[in-house]
Amino acid sequence: MKTAKLIVIYPTPTDLATFEQRYAEEHVPMAVEKLSGKTRFVASLITSSVSPYHRMAEVYFPSMQVLEACLSSPGGQETAQHAVDISTGELPLFLTAEVDSFDF
């Protein structure tokens, strides 16, 4: 069975300091606590100067069914809404993906 991940891509915020503070102090702890079934959480700061995006979060799950159950749960809904609330640019982009991993 393939694993799955939720990808959240945040546009460049209009208020960078407020976004970064809320992301670090509120959102990451909320995601760690409330996203049930996750196996890994990766938070990336986008450093490319040509990108309209500022951050990307990847939350891994053992299957698409576990990911979908998480997103349907109260904790998943609350965390997704919080992602929207802290985004001071445009709305964040939410994607789901099946994952094939290759280790070298």
Image (spheres, rainbow, N blue to C red):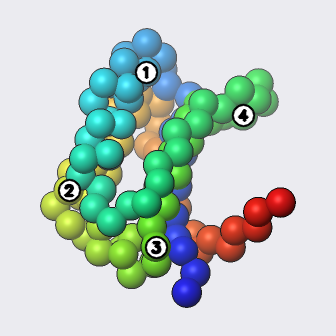
Spatial separation of the CA atoms under disc 2 and disc 1: 22 Å
Give the mark, 3 or 4, whose residue is nearer the N terminus. 4
Local crowd at mark 1 within 10 Å, few (<14), some, or many (≥20)?
some
Q: Which residue is mark 2?
A: 75
The circle on residue 62 is 3
Q: Which residue is mark 4?
A: 51
Q: Position of residue 5 (x, y in %)?
A: 51, 64
Front-most of residues 37 and 93: 37
Judge left or right: residue 74 versus residue 20.
left
Spatial separation of the CA atoms under disc 3 and disc 2: 18 Å
Q: Residue at x 30, y 56 (%)?
A: 35
Q: Residue at x 57, y 69 (%)?
A: 97
The mark closer to the camera, 2 or 4, is: 2
Residue 8 seen in the current view: no
The mark closer to the camera, 3 or 2, is: 3
Give the mark, 3 or 2, whose residue is nearer the N terminus. 3
Q: Position of residue 37 (x, y in %)?
A: 33, 66
Q: SS of the residue at dot 3?
A: loop
Spatial separation of the CA atoms under disc 3 and disc 4: 30 Å
Local crowd at mark 4 within 10 Å, few (<14), some, or many (≥20)?
few
Give the mark, 1 or 3, whose residue is nearer the N terminus. 1
Q: Which residue is mark 1?
A: 20
Spatial separation of the CA atoms under disc 1 and disc 3: 29 Å
Q: Residue at x 38, y 29 (%)?
A: 23
Residue farthest left in this picture: 74
Q: Amino acid at mark 2?
A: Gly
